[in-house]
Image (cartoon, helix red, strand yellow):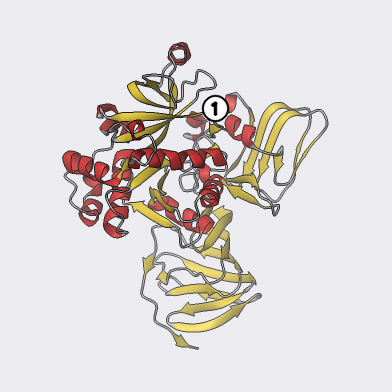
Amino acid sequence: MHIILLSGGSGKRLWPLSNDIRSKQFIKIFRTKDGSYESMVQRVYHQIREVDKEATVTIATSKTQASSIHNQLGDEVLVCVEPCRRDTFPAVVLATAYLHDVRGISGEEPVIVCPVDPYVEIDYFEALKKLADIARGDEQDKALKGGANLVLMGMEPTYPSEKYGYILPTDKETVSGVKTFREKPDAKTAREYIRQGALWNGGVFAYQMKYVLEKAREIIGYADYETLYEKYDTLEKISFDYAVVEKEKNIKVMRFKGQWKDLGTWNTLSEAMEEPCVGDAILNETCENVHVLNELDVPVLCMGLKNMVVSASPEGILVSDKEQSSYIKPFVDKIDQQVMFAEKSWGDFLVLDVTRESRTSKVTLKPGHGMNYHSHARRDEVWNIISGKGRCVIDGKSRPVKAGDVLEMKAGCRHTIMADTELKIIEIQLGPEISVHDKQKFELETKEE
C-alpha cells in the first residue's frame, strides 16, 4: 500500500493539551501493552504496519508539526512538509508529486489518502487495502471498478451528525456508484440523508497516482514536485472535495461498517479512553462518567463530579461538562498565551516559569540528537545539566558535559549541545526581548577544548 496520512489542524478544541504546534493527534492517551501511552498518530502508524509491514506511509503536514511527527515516529518516517497551509487539495497534490517525482513510484500505482487521527481498529486498514485494489482494478470482479477515477470510503452512520458531509450511493451494494454529495447539514436534514441510505464522508479515498497528477496539471499547472513546492504559497486554498471529488463523474464508494470515530472534542476523545485517568489523578466513589488527563506533576482530586472532563497541562486547566466541552473554541481563542510545551525531532521542552525578562524551561534531548548550532542576538542563556551525558560546542570549542555542569552563553555566542545518553537540561533565558525569532543558525565547526 501507498498511504498518504493528512496531518493538519491546530489545537483549539482539545485545549489545554493541544496548541498551534501540538495538535490532537499527538496527545498520548492510549495505553500500550508495555504500560506506556501512545498518541493517535502513533496508534494509526502501528496499525498500518501490523496490516502491511511494507506499506509506504507518507505524512503530509505543516512545518510546525514535522518535528512532533519525527519525535513520535522516528527519523525514518516519510514526511512531506507543506511550505504553508493551503487546505487538502494542494496538500494531496504535493504529497502525490513527492511520491512520484522524488520517491520514483509509478503513476499506475494506487494511493490511499486518509486522516492521521481516526479511532479505528485493524479492520479499517484491511478495508484500505481493498480500496487500493479497487482503484488499481485488481478485484476479481473488474466491474467493481467500472472505470472509476476515484474510490471513496463511506462510513456507515451511527447517528444524524452535523459534523460530516454525506455520500449518497446509487444502491446498497458494498461498492456502489455515487449519486451525489451533501454538505454538512443540520440534524433534521442529516436524519433525512440517513433515511435515503447516505454514508458519512470520512475524507478517505483512493486513486491511481497519475489521475491526481493530471488533475493538478489542469487546475494549477503542475509540472514537477520542485516547481510545485516553490510556488506553493501562491496556490488557492481549496479542499480536495471541492476541487476534485464534487466534479468527478467516474466515482465509486465502498462501504465501511466497522468502528470509526473522529476524536475531535473532549467528549468524543473521552469515549475512546480505556481508563478514566491518565496522569496523577484520584476519583472518589461518587464520581460518574468522569475522565481526567493530567500532564502536571501535581495530583488532581475529583469528588462528586458527573459527566465531566478535567484536563491539566502547563498551558491551563479545563473543568467542563462533557457536552459543553464541544463549545470550547471561542473561549480558547480569547486566551493569549505562548506555547508552553512542544515536541521536537531532537526531544522536547517544557516551560517552567516566565517573567518579564526571563524564561526557564526543562529541555530533554534524545540520545544521538542535538540542537542546531545557533546564536541569539538579544538574550543570554544558562544551561544546567541535571542528568545524562553529552557534548557541547561553544564558539567552536567542543567539550563533554555531564550532570552538574553549568554552561553560560552570552548574547551573540554560538552554541549547541548533543546527547550521548538522554540529556535533561534546565535552560534559563535572560534578556529584555525573548522571542523564538531571535535565532541565527550556523554550520558547525569544532575543535577540542
Quadrant in the rendering for residue 16: top right
Find residue 320 and report its horizontal and vertical position in percent. 63, 29
Image coords of residue 141 (percent x, y): 38, 34
Decide: is 392 above or below 45: below
- Judge whether residue 9 can be spotted in this image: no
Query: Mark 1, residues whose alpha carbon is within 10 Å: few (<14), some, or many (≥20)?
Result: some
How many numbered marks have been drawn onto this rendered protein structure?
1
Lateral position of residue 207 relative to residue 361, left or right: left
Please give the name of the residue rendered at 50% of the width and 47% of the height, measured from the top-left corner: 22
Residue at the spot x=29%, y=59% of the render? 102
Do we see residue 408 in this rendering? yes
Please name the residue that numbered disc 1 is placed on: 326
Percent x, y of residue 1 = 42, 49
- In this view, the residue in front, 140 or 323, is 140
Helix, strand or loop at label 1? It is helix
Residue sticking out furthest to the right: 285
Q: Quadrant of residue 9?
A: top left
What is the three-letter code of the residue carrying label 1?
A: Ser
Question: Relative to residue 401, is residue 267 depicted above or below?
Answer: above
Relative to 358, is 80 on the left or the right? left
Front position in the image: 351 or 373: 373
